[in-house]
Amino acid sequence: MNAQNVEIDWEAARTANLQNWDDRVPLHEAAYGLDGFDDPNHLSDVVSDDLPVLGRFVPGGSLSGLDVCHLQCHIGTDTISLARAGAHVTGVDFSEPALRAAAALAERTGVAATWVRTDVLEARNAVPGDFDVVYTSIGTICWLQDLDRWAAQIVALLRPGGTFFIRDGHPALLALDEDAPEMTTRYAYFGDGRAQQWDDESTYAGDGRVAHPRTYEWPHPLSEILGALLRAGLRLLHFDEGRTLPWRFSPRMVEVPRGYAWPEAERDLIPCTFTIVARKD
């Protein structure tokens, strides 16, 4: 794959991205192993990995009884997993087909959830109530141009004392050439306001092809991510970096328990994910 840096209006980029994500829904319904959720104890790998960290920063070490807002929830597998961990969940996404798929899965598996269709950057205006936890994970903020606006939504959704959690692909990883035979930087780590334009018929899950392959993403260095959250008034509680991913970023990555990683000799060279936990005082 290759990306071109382009000037594009946010609404035009959002429209293209929405068409692409709408196309992904049936592909991901087939690829996400939804039948596994017929087991009432089944949780997604993403939430299973996130809960031990998040549990350290919520009352009683558990989501039980807490109101949780899951931003950019896609087809709801992680949202349903949060509900199975005891939370009262609201899933938020901009794709109507994704939310229909999420609602159907929740109904089939007997999980109570609220679903709200809205852009994440408009979440406070669209989502009723406030929350003990706002959660987002994984592969989310590259789709957003304005992280200050994103962070403002998070703060506005949280109750005083509420907790924000994010795990996402590490910006240093996303600067690498995914096709190179060794670790080589190819894409900008620091953004300049322009979007990366991608043309790719595949998705990160399954073998199908989308009808709308063009998407737009924005690089965000760690300084921008942390800065946006701190400027919005959140207090940093936890920061960590990880060596594995839940998707294969590069063909050179190898499958490991619960995800993918670089070959062992390279595993300590660069982080694959970051995790941030922050609080609204």
Image (spheres, rainbow, N blue to C red):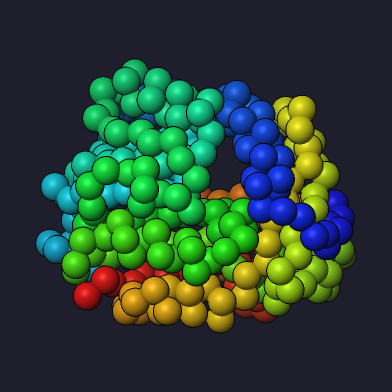
Q: Residue at 49% of width from left, 79% of height from top?
A: 227
Of 188 and 19, which appears nearest the observer?
19
Left or right of 124, for residue 144: right
* Vertical relation: 201 (above or below) 69: above
Drawn side of residue 86 relative to residue 169, left or right: left
Image position of 34 with respect to 236: above or below: above
Q: Which residue: 19% across, 67% down?
A: 160
Q: Residue 189 falls in which quadrant of the image?
A: bottom right
Q: Place residue 213 in its image quadrant.
A: top right
Residue 177 appears at what percent x and percent y? 81, 65
Report the number of discs. 0
Asked if residue 208 lies left or right of residue 231, the reply is: right
Q: Nearer the viewer, residue 96 or 111?
A: 96
Residue 148 percent location from the top left of the image: 50, 69
Q: Position of residue 144 (x, y in %)?
A: 59, 57
> Is residue 176 visible from the viewing direction of this image?
no
Position of the C terminus, as image quadrant, is bottom left
Percent position of residue 62, x then y: 19, 56
User: Which quadrant of the view contains residue 6?
Assistant: bottom right
Left or right, residue 65 beside residue 17: left
Q: Can residue 190 be seen in this view?
A: yes
